[in-house]
Amino acid sequence: KIFEEFQPHLLKQHENMPKLTYDNFSMAVDEFFSLLEGQKRAIRAEAAEESALERLEKIKKDQSKRMDGLENEMEKVRDHAQLVEMHADDVDKAIGVINSALDSGMDWTALFELVEVEKAN
């Protein structure tokens, strides 16, 4: 039941509306306010449930975006790994050259210049 208002007398404008009658006005007031409290609790519960569902949906969307981002990152890393595997010999040679240059005492600036020259070749 949803009560809109209570009146001690039936007014003309309410004659065509659904109505309940009580033995006395006190009973009408008691039932009106007790049901009004129930309605407020129900509305608060519905609002809390709706809020929880909205938060859940937001979390699901966020997790989905994160998954998509991680999958894209995984593809990039997989592609890089395949490139390294395909050129493993060249990578090993480059690591060897860098390690031997560092072992011979070459400083980092000169090493960087060496790498730049080799990239150009």
Image (cartoon, rainbow, N blue to C red):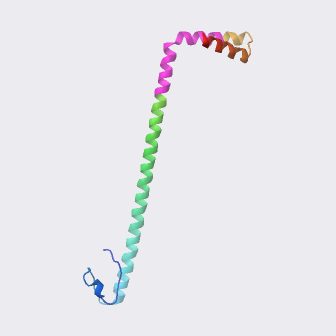
Placement of 118 over or under 81, stated as above or below: above
- Identify the residue shown where x is 40% and y is 59%: 49
From the image, which quarter does the N terminus lie in? bottom left
**Relative to residue 17, is residue 102 drawn left or right?**
right
Q: Is residue 14 above or below residue 74?
A: below
Residue extending farthest front: 120
Q: Main secondary structure of the magenta part?
A: helix
Coordinates of residue 5 in the picture (x, y in percent): 36, 81
Q: Residue at x 38, y 72 (%)?
A: 38
For the C terminus, which image quadrant? top right
Q: Which residues are magenta?
A: 75-98
Residue occupying image coordinates x 41% and y 64%: 45
How many marks the image carries: the answer is 0
Q: Quick check: 41 left or right of 83?
A: left
Residue drawn 26% across the image and 85% down it: 15
- The x and y percentages for residue 12 are 28, 87
Q: Is residue 77 magenta?
A: yes
Q: Is residue 85 left or right of residue 32?
A: right
**Depicted 23 relative to depicted 47: above or below:** below
Residue 28: x and y, percent? 34, 85
Q: Is residue 80 left or right of residue 99?
A: left
Q: Is residue 119 magenta?
A: no
The quadrant holding residue 31 is bottom left
